[in-house]
Amino acid sequence: MKTIKLEVYGLVQGVGFRFMTKKLADELGVKGIVMNRNDGSVYIEAQADPMTLQQFISQVKLSPSPSGRVDDVRIDEIDHAPYKDFSVTYQ
């Protein structure tokens, strides 16, 4: 199990991006969190096996929301205790 954080920039707030990201995560079996940030970006922590994470990253880069647009994604591996599910959180 690997855990990564993604910082997603573009048109990613107000377009259903978090909820579509949760739907994608649930379909792939990814655990973690997604939340809006004050700077207009979206923050994601995702936990799964490396192949599944690659699929997840690819879909996030394409924007899981049809109304969204992803301009940049910054990805780093992090240490985190196991997540139980994938949830939309609020700051």
Image (tube, helix red, strand yellow):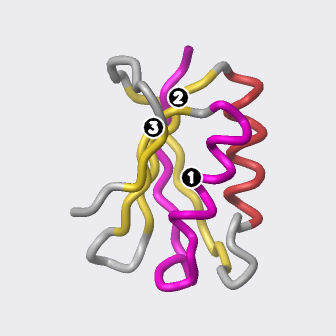
- Left/right of residue 19 with respect to residue 49 in the rendered view: left
First reached walking from the N terminus: tag 2 or tag 3: 3
Real-space Cα separation, disc 1 to disc 3, in angstroms? 9 Å
Figure quadrant of residue 55: top right
Query: Residue 89: horizontal and vertical position, in percent?
Result: 32, 55
Q: Is the Cβ of the residue at disc 2 closer than 8 Å to that at disc 3?
A: yes
User: Rounded to the nearest whole Å, what is the CA distance between mark 1 and mark 2?
Assistant: 13 Å
Front one among 10 and 45: 45
Disc 1: CA contacts within 10 A as few (<14), some (14-19) or many (>=20): many
Type of the residue with mark 3? Gly
Per the image, the residue denoted by label 3 is: 32
Disc 2 secondary structure class: strand
Q: Is residue 7 left or right of residue 81?
A: right
Mark 2 crowd level (few <14, some 14–19, many ≥20, 10 Å Cα): many
- Vertical relation: 37 (above or below) 45: below
Q: Is residue 54 one of those drawn in magenta?
A: no
Q: Earlier in the sequence, mark 1 or mark 3?
A: 1
Q: Which amino acid type is shown beneath numbered disc 2? A: Gln
When the figure is inspected, residue 48 is found, relative to residue 41, above or below; the finding is above
Q: Which residue is mark 2?
A: 47
SS for callout 1: helix
Residue 52 x, y percent position in the rendering? 73, 29
In the image, taking residue 60 as reference, residue 45 lies left or right, namely left
Q: Which span is picked out in magenta?
A: 1-29
- Decide if residue 32 is on the left or right side of residue 59: left
Which amino acid, by three-letter code, is at mark 1?
A: Lys
Residue drawn at point x = 34 percent, y = 23 percent? 80
Q: Which mark is residue 22?
A: 1
Q: Residue furthest top?
A: 1
- Horizontal and vertical percent position of residue 88: 41, 55
The residue sitting at 66% across, 19% down in the picture is 49
